[in-house]
Amino acid sequence: MDERFDAIVVGAGPAGLSAAYVMAKAGLNVVVIERGDFPGSKNVMGGVLYRQPTEQVFPEFWRTAPLERYVTQQSLWVLSKDSALQIGHKSEAFAREPYNAFTVLRAKFDKWMAKQVTEAGALVVPETVVEEVIRHDGRVVGVRTGREEGDLYADVVIAADGVNSLLAQKAGLHPEWKPNQVALVVKEVIALPRERITDRFHLEEEAGATIEMVGEATAGMMGTAFIYTNKDSLSIGVGAVISDLVATQTNPNDLLEQLKAHPVVRPLVEGGETREYLAHLIPEGGFHGVPRVHCDGMLVVGDAAQLVNSYHREGSNLAMLSGKLAAETVIEARKRGDFSAAALSAYRRRLDESFIIKDLRKYAHASAYFEHRKHFFTLYPDLVNMAAREFLTVDSVPKRRKQWQIVRTALRARSPLGMLRDAWGVFRRMI
């Protein structure tokens, strides 16, 4: 293996492979270093991939990539202890090519991406741990791996090694993340016959569904849960910010078991067999958590740069686009022969001009607001389910009286002023 490259990418996830693919297609000599046995072996996400952002890197990928189902219906469930208020949308437009989104299994899809990268001319090296960056005169010039004679050198290093990126931290681009800036998600892939999934979720044969859940799913902690349909399995998971897990001494595995046992979830997973169990850290720092993403000879992309919009379930698409923007920055820098921090700062400008940072800025203050108002995850889910149950119960009580019963119960739980403050707070930070 040649020790000298135009670019070294650390991490073979969506961000790293996208960056490597764009650079390799432009003729750069690129190597991707992956610590797992193969790309995708250690990579975890909920399992939804958006078509349009992915096509910006891999045109018409959906014709050949190993996808599970195209998503036609998406739902939000607000859970109380024994019920759920369900809000959903199903569209025939999402059932037509080129589709809007797909469910995927990363072990399959990342392998496919890596194949595209190698066919474009890059070298992918698995089972290799990058221990630190190599500096010369203050500039990043390569990486040190755990292999014998494993020092590799390049004009630029792209850190795509996930939320717990030691490279970016060792390069001085950010301190260790705070517990409220990272969430821990646990997930199971549960095998079920294809026809049973189709029946339970009321789907056409190749169509898929997604369900996001808040409230009781996280036992009052700031976080979410999900169920996504695959061809012959379900991806089910739950996550919460680490600060809440530590404060409540909650085991995330217990959260997942409680979720599977919930009365409205249990019928969906009943009879299934756990095929995989996975755990993953995801960024929750939002706009204010995005670190410095460039220095002399180095760029940071994807989860390593806290580029996740959890309010819209967007992570892999932001990772891919950030990898693409980083690659375009490197291509320009190579033409000029300048890999200084000043030259690579064009990457941050590209991010700022994209929807990535614009969307993160939109929700810049949301996480801090909800972090200190846990009643959004306990009180309000209970109230909306109480209201729905009461109003839909037919017991010869006049509807006007039911309405006032609902109002009185709600006002006993939260004052009118408190509700107005909550509504205004959500409006300011989310709208």
Image (spheres, grey):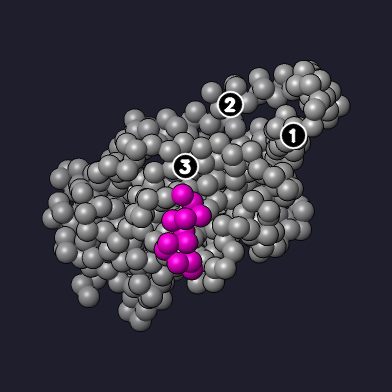
Q: Position of residue 114 (x, y in %)?
A: 27, 64
Which quarter of the image is occupied by the N terminus? bottom left
- Disc 3 packing (10 Å; few <14; some 14–19; many ≥20): some
Residue type at mark 1 is: Thr
> What amino acid is at disc 3?
Gln
Q: Image point 15% across, 45% down: which residue? A: 335
Residue under circle 3?
Answer: 74
Q: Is residue 85 left or right of residue 231?
A: right
* Residue displayed at 32% across by 79% down: 149
Residue, disc 1: 393
- Closest to the camera, between mark 3 and mark 1, is 1
Say what amino acid the circle numbered 2 marks: Arg
Residue 162 visible (yes or no): no
Q: Dot 2 corresponds to which residue?
A: 429
Residue 378 is left or right of residue 277, and the answer is: right
Q: Which dot marks residue 315?
A: none
Q: Residue furthest left?
A: 27
Q: Secondary structure at mark 3?
A: strand
Q: Gap in Å between the C-alphas at discs 2 and 1? A: 35 Å
- Where are the magenta residues, as a range? 191-202
Crowdedness near tag 1: few (<14), some (14–19) or many (≥20) residues, C-alpha within 10 Å: few
Tell me the residue at 22%/58% (across/down).
64
Q: CA distance from mark 3 to mark 2?
A: 24 Å
Q: Is residue 331 above or below residue 147?
A: above
342 is higher (above) or lower (below) than 353 = below
